[in-house]
Image (cartoon, grey):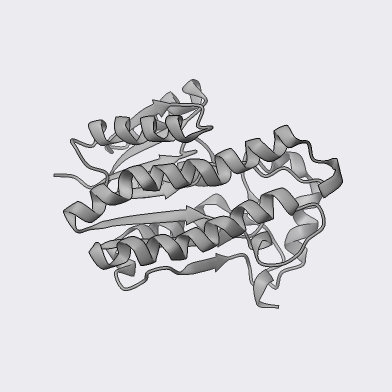
């Protein structure tokens, strides 16, 4: 039976790059996203290349939608999900006093609540089978104070801690939980940043933004048996920014 992976936010950017790379390895990829057209295009391209893919349309925003996506993915995976990639997220920038309560709730709902309840639904099933891999997407700005990053950075700092907690809770039963912490990356979502992305990237030794494929390579490493002895780790893929 094929390995099955659920990738949230899998219809564009880093998530789509991960879906393509896993599909090339023979993994059945289930991509979840809001945009039906992008979803259908993503799975059509994977299928044309000989891969196996399905799409779940969902506006992930709370515990019930997360649990529903998990259950639908399990059905599509013939009763199991072997890999969970918690990639979906939003990253608004702005000073703390400028943020509304509504924005706060949206950020924490998608960036923290949704991964939390996807793991709550899927990790016990993985543990019951004795094997699974979960990769959470974090960010370099969860590791240092940066003006305008209060919501985004703090939500991903929560993910960093949850990665360790989930490794402690499920690791002894064969479920590896790790995180990837990207730096500035060129995607459809960051296109609106313009020169701001370049300025942020210039702070790192690499001196440039990453490509989605570069981040995806790290995610695939942690999602597969290539990293079989890695648990509870946070892999920085930020061009060296958090090393200086």
Position in image of residue 70 (x %, y %): 34, 36
Q: Residue at x 38, y 34 (%)?
A: 67
Q: Tell me if residue 17 can be seen.
A: no
Position in image of residue 78 (x %, y %): 18, 35
Whether residue 4 is situated above or below residue 233 in the rendered picture? above
- Give the side of residue 124 with respect to residue 186, left or right: left
Between 95 and 23, the one lying in front of the other is 95
Whether residue 9 is situated above or below residue 185 in the rendered picture? above
Position in image of residue 83 (x %, y %): 32, 50
Residue that sits furthest to the left in the current view: 1
Q: Quadrant where the C terminus lies? A: bottom right
Q: Quadrant where the N terminus lies? A: top left
Q: Residue at x 61, y 59 (%)?
A: 157
Position in image of residue 156 (x %, y %): 60, 55
- Give the side of residue 1 with respect to residue 161, left or right: left
Q: Quadrant of residue 147?
A: bottom right
Between 15 and 142, the one lying in front of the other is 142
Between 168 and 27, the one lying in front of the other is 168
Residue that sits furthest to the bottom in the current view: 244
Whether residue 109 is situated above or below residue 141 in the rendered picture? above
Task: Give the mark count.
Answer: 0
Q: Tell me if residue 28 can be seen.
A: yes
- Give the side of residue 2 with respect to residue 13, left or right: left
Residue that sits furthest to the top in the current view: 37
Q: Residue at x 68, y 60 (%)?
A: 141
Q: Residue at x 17, y 53 (%)?
A: 129
């Amino acid at each position: 039976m094929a390995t099955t992976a659920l990738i949230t936010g899998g219809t564009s950017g880093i998530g789509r790059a991960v879906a393509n790379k896993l599909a090339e390895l023979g993994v059945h990829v289930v991509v979840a996203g809001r945009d039906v057209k992008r979803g259908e295009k993503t799975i059509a391209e994977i299928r044309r290349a000989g891969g196996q893919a399905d799409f779940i349309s969902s506006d992930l925003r709370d515990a019930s939608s997360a649990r529903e996506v998990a259950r639908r993915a399990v059905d599509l995976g013939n009763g199991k999900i072997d890999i969970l990639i918690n990639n979906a997220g939003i990253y608004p920038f702005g000073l703390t006093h400028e943020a509304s309560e509504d924005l706060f709730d949206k950020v924490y709902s998608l960036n923290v609540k949704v991964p939390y309840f996807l793991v709550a639904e899927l990790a016990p099933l993985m543990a019951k089978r004795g094997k699974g891999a979960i990769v959470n997407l974090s960010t370099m700005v969860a590791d240092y104070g940066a003006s305008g990053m209060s919501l985004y950075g703090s939500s991903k700092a929560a993910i960093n801690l949850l990665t360790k907690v989930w490794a402690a809770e499920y690791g002894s039963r064969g479920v590896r939980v790790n995180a990837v912490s990207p730096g500035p990356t060129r995607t459809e979502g960051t296109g609106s940043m313009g020169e701001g992305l370049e300025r942020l990237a210039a702070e790192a030794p690499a001196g440039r933004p990453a490509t989605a494929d570069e981040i995806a390579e790290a995610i695939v490493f942690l999602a597969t048996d290539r990293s079989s002895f890695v648990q509870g780790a946070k892999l920085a893929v930020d061009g060296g920014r958090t090393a200086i």
